[in-house]
Amino acid sequence: MKIVVNEREHDLPAGGTAGSVRDRLKPDADVLIVNGFPAEPGRELAAGDRLVLIRRGEVPTAAELDALLTARHTPGVHDRVKRATVGIAGVGGLGSAVAVALARTGVGNLIIADFDLVEPSNLNRQQYFLDQLGLPKVYALRDTLARINPHVHVSACHLRLTPGNIAEIFGTVDVLVEAFDRADQKAMLTETFTARFPDKPLVAGSGMAGFGPANSVTTRRAFGRLYLCGDGETAAAPGVGLMAPRVGVAAHHQANAVLRLLLGENPEC
């Protein structure tokens, strides 16, 4: 009978149990999951079942994780994603969430740049932890991404981006994400990158403050290869703060736009 074990199909004798398959394929596994539910070793298996064998504390090898992501994404999709390089300018509320989403997706190379440190006020919406307070954001985020997917190569640049260093830092990217807070920084990055690399996509964020409707956050093309994610209007102001839910919606619009661009799709559709 054919069953799927750790996302790979196996042709095994009928009448087997989760424990017998474990003993055959991964005898040191101490967690058995059948069709999404914890199972005892004596659980009988049927054709088409999906069995996951886990040894607690074990980190999958690069090949094992690649196989898992390939099974989830389909081979053609994952092959293109893992060869990609994505830059993220600013790793605050938008950029840190974009980085986490792309690492979970298996993007092969991330270049992250920011001069800032993790502050207590960041924790309401940014992908950092209490024990990372005071650390440079790019190094804290690099450590977090390594826990999510240690096989993604992360280049962490702890510096202030300027018109003079943007091309050097992000010249190799397939797509760049703009994730700054300040309007002048957004304009500087957009003007510099689009002038230097007019054929490379830039995915920017604009308008995600407060707790307004999530459905007002959209992805649209502004001009050339510049795409904007947000409602285009809502800025942080007294009584309209930056909060995790809506910032996260905009960030995942950006991450999804990046993925669609890497796969040759139109982010607006």
Image (cartoon, grey):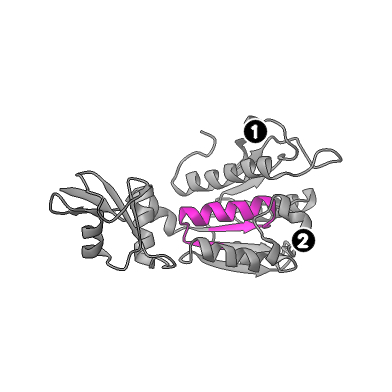
User: Label 2 is placed on what type of residue?
Assistant: Glu
Task: Identify which residue is drawn at 53% across, 48% down.
Answer: 258
Q: Is residue 225 visible?
A: no
Name the residue that disc number 2 marks.
119
Task: Identify which residue is drawn at 22% across, 48% down.
Answer: 45
User: Label 1 is placed on what type of residue?
Assistant: Ala
**Which callout, 2 or 1, points at the residue further toward the start of the chain?**
2
Q: Viewer-proximal residue, 64 or 176?
A: 64
Disc 2: CA contacts within 10 A as few (<14), some (14-19) or many (>=20): some
Instruction: Return the x and y of residue 143 as percentages of the image width and height.
Output: 59, 67
268 up-or-down from 128: above or below: above
Residue 214's disc is: 1
Q: Is residue 223 left or right of residue 211?
A: left
Q: Is residue 12 visible?
A: yes
Instruction: Return the x and y of residue 43 as percentages of the image width and height.
Output: 26, 50
Instruction: Return the x and y of residue 265 as percentages of the image width and height.
Output: 46, 41
Residue 140's disc is: none
Asked which quadrant contains residue 215, the reply is top right
What residue span does the magenta drawing correspond to?
86-110
Q: Secondary structure at mark 2?
A: loop
167 up-or-down from 15: above or below: below
Instruction: Return the x and y of residue 177 as percentages of the image width and height.
Output: 61, 52
Disc 1: CA contacts within 10 A as few (<14), some (14-19) or many (>=20): some
